Image (cartoon, grey):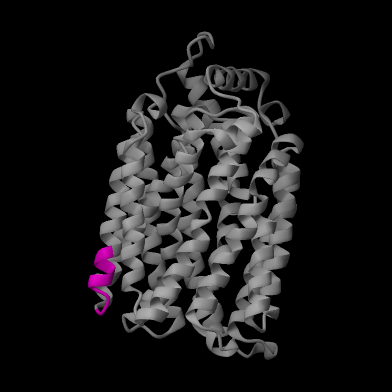
Amino acid sequence: METKSPGAHEGAGMVAPNFEAATYNKVGWRLIPFLLLCYIVSYLDRVNVGFAKLQMLQDLNLSETVYGLGAGIFFIGYFLFEVPSNVILHRVGARIWIARIMVTWGVISATMMFVTSATSFYVVRFLLGVAEAGFFPGIILYLTYWYPAERRARMTALFMTAIALSGVIGGPFSGWIMHSFGGVAGLKDWQWLFVLEGLPSIIMGIVTFFYLDDRIDHAKWLTREEKALLDRNIVAENTGKQDLKIGAVFASARVWLMSLIYFCFVMGLYGVSFWLPTIIKATGVKDALQIGLLTAIPFAFGAVAMVLVSRSADRSRERRWHIAIPSLLGAAGLVLSAVWAQNTFLAMAALTVATMGILTTLPLFWSLPTAFLAGTGAAAGIALINSLGNLAGFASPFAVGWLKDLTQSTNAGMYLLAASMVLGALLTLSVPARLVNK
């Protein structure tokens, strides 16, 4: 977990570089693997509906448009409760609140097995969004309590490799469940999928309550000297940041620009996450286990790209081009996946490039708003940006599903997602370099 830096922050006193590096290494190994595991089980619960779709739509006689709306309605509940959830986390602490989130979303995710109609599908997906609201922005906020800017991009990237790893692990696992459990105890394969992938969230939520520390001062596993170093670095970094009131956050043009940029990138993310199994199936692969194994490939390459590019961004302290270039590559991959839709090998190559580009933009994006927000303003601002951006999680699957019903192909949907990634790149380059290159 070690991340090199030029030394201690100005005004923090003379600190041996080896001591500082060792301290952050200790923090990294304590926090990041655990948070990553939490996000993996979170993301599995969010997107396993993409695998369930392979059989659920036929069993329940649902259309592609209904699926797209149901997959996306999760983000309406998410949007409505995101800001209050993050403000509560900032006040009561991450340990209690993240544990609460994980247990409730695990229970609700498992209840997807009882869906019998479009209406029940919509209701449970909406409630799942309500339950999970605040988890991701809560972790982004939590990392600002521990890491200064020059270390945070890589730590955020390591945490967010959970998105890619959930694809690497979840794809084959979901395919195996649907391949092996259909008919067991009278349940359909997709019903088993929701039950077996909901349990880990409940377990991890309970563990979170006992494992996580709210703040640096609460960490009994740190020495007094280590706590003092970490505290000084955070205080030094927060000097000059804006601790906006909640009302001012909603009125901030910068926050709204960040929300629009994130919306563009999330369009690409959930277009791939919710439709990747369907796209692979359309190339001629029919077996659920084989589809699951193939979905792991783009996410595996994506995980590597996330870490390497974020490390480069931290080393150079340059953010904008490290976001814009991967975004443009993601757009190119989406377009080529449509052009080569009838060839499994070429389509997989294009989808791999697309996934690498899309996933790389996400952790680096969060280096932009956290460069100028602090305190309650950061809690509300991060949540607002994430909630508005994640409305793309509603728009993206619904738009792709509607276009697929309209054209009998996912190609038009891929072109729409590519255009969104290009717009995100252009908007990122419009942000002043002096604001974010820290």
User: Going 28% across and 61% down the picture, which residue do you hit?
Assistant: 333
Q: Is residue 377 or residue 211 the one in the foreground?
A: 377
Q: Is residue 34 or residue 274 the one in the foreground?
A: 274
Q: Is residue 7 magenta?
A: no
Residue 428 in the image: above or below residue 371: below
Residue 317 place in picture, x, y as percent: 36, 28
Question: Residue 195's quadrant in the figure?
Answer: bottom right
Q: Is residue 1 or residue 191 the one in the foreground?
A: 191
User: Going 48% across and 62% down the picture, which residue do you hit?
Assistant: 395
Residue 260 is left or right of residue 130, and the answer is left
Residue 164 visible somewhere in the drawing: yes
User: Going 61% across and 27% down the picture, which residue do you hit?
Assistant: 244
User: Going 44% across and 31% down the picture, which residue do you hit?
Assistant: 3
**What is the number of callouts on the image?**
0
Residue 199 visible somewhere in the drawing: no
Residue 319 place in picture, x, y as percent: 36, 34
Question: Residue 312's quadrant in the figure?
Answer: top left
Residue 372 place in picture, x, y as percent: 50, 27
Residue 279 is left or right of residue 112, and the answer is left
Residue 148 is left or right of residue 244, and the answer is left
Magenta span: predominant SS is: helix
Residue 349 is left or right of residue 167, and the answer is left
Quarter of the picture containing the C terminus is top left
Question: Residue 114's quadrant in the figure?
Answer: bottom right
Q: Is residue 336 magenta?
A: yes
Residue 242 place in picture, x, y as percent: 56, 24
In this view, the residue farthest toward the front is 251
Q: Which contiguous range is marked in magenta?
A: 335-342
